[in-house]
Amino acid sequence: MSFAIKQDAECELQRKALCQQGNRHLMITTEQRSSLRGELLLDEPMSKHTSWRVGGPADYVYKPADIADLAKFLEMLAVPSVVPPMQEVPIHWVGLGSNLLVRDGGIRGVVILTSGLLNTLEFLGEGVFRAEAGVACAKVARQVAKSDYVGSAFLAGIPGTIGGALAMNAGAFGGETWDKVIAVETIDRQGQQHIRDPAEYQVSYRQVKGPADEWFVAGHFKFAAGDGAEALTQIKNLLAKRNASQPTNQPSCGSVFRNPKNDFAARLIEVSGLKGSCIGGACVSEKHANFIVNSGNASASDIEALIALVAARVKLAHNIELVQEAHVIGEENG
């Protein structure tokens, strides 16, 4: 079958569709499924798809074959007969799963996976590169440099995909994603695709606001011509710097908190005496205090509790409220 189901038994899909309550319904007919080319997974553990390596099961995970296939799937979900009673099924988008904490009870609704799936990266000419949502930021950085354009090195420091970088204006090493954006491609709940101008978005530090109920499926980025070999050397040096200062060999989400104005979250956490603090298997990294690592047996609740403890201690010690950069979704209990 071109449309693969994780559970081989056809009755499992029907059982789940008929037995679940409220917005856990997803009644897709055999005819509808046959028109799709992607892969639908049921009760998929999100620990497989997050950089923290924690998270309970999602009701449904869809792995689109391409943007056209994704559009068809979303159009299908918008049909009332697919999701009875007449209510919208929750939809969550996940790339590399960095900057994301999925609670132990998992996710109700549908997760769209993009990493390695919506993965087209192409040169459009005149310094413009088009990258789909599932392309790793580091891949874009290297390809731009190999094409003898400069200004992409900061992307190598973002441990995620283009879709996530666009959604939060991700940045590293002094650069930010939207500084290079000249257009974005989006898709809405009905599967309709749009091309948007940056002027249609309000972009600030780690925050992007735009048209409601639309998700990024690609970005168009413009870079200046320059010395590609020098740019590749810069990328190599920046990655070496990151590896030396961050716990890249342990499961984490990257930076947990945004940097306050004129200060650094890591400094505040460290001087608050929190380096090495643990709850269960979740620990504040000894290498970089703004990283919480999974030491091997952490649960999502361990991590969430440690995030709350760090924020409370910094507030008490410095009267500064750290703003959480990591997004938390899902149900608390399994």
Image (tube, rainbow, N blue to C red):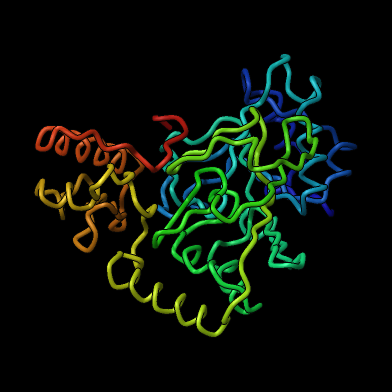
Q: Residue at x 34, y 39 (%)?
A: 324
Tell how many labels. 0
* Residue 264 vertical position relative to residue 233 in the rendered view, above or below: above
Which of 148/271 is in front?
148
User: 157 left or right of 60?
Assistant: left
* Residue 271 vertical position relative to residue 76 in the rendered view, above or below: below
Quarter-wise, where is residue 301 in the image?
top left
Which of 240/279 is in front?
240
Which of 225/245 is in front?
225
* Residue 240, x across and y down, in percent: 36, 76
* Residue 220, x across and y down, in percent: 68, 55
- Residue extending furthest toward the bottom: 229
User: 134 left or right of 165?
Assistant: right
Which of 189/105 is in front?
189
For the N terminus, the image quarter is bottom right
For the C terminus, the image quarter is top left
Q: Residue at x 58, y 76 (%)?
A: 145
User: 333 left or right of 257?
Assistant: right
Quarter-wise, where is residue 236 in the image?
bottom left
* Residue 116, x across and y down, in percent: 64, 61
Q: Residue at x 65, y 44 (%)?
A: 216
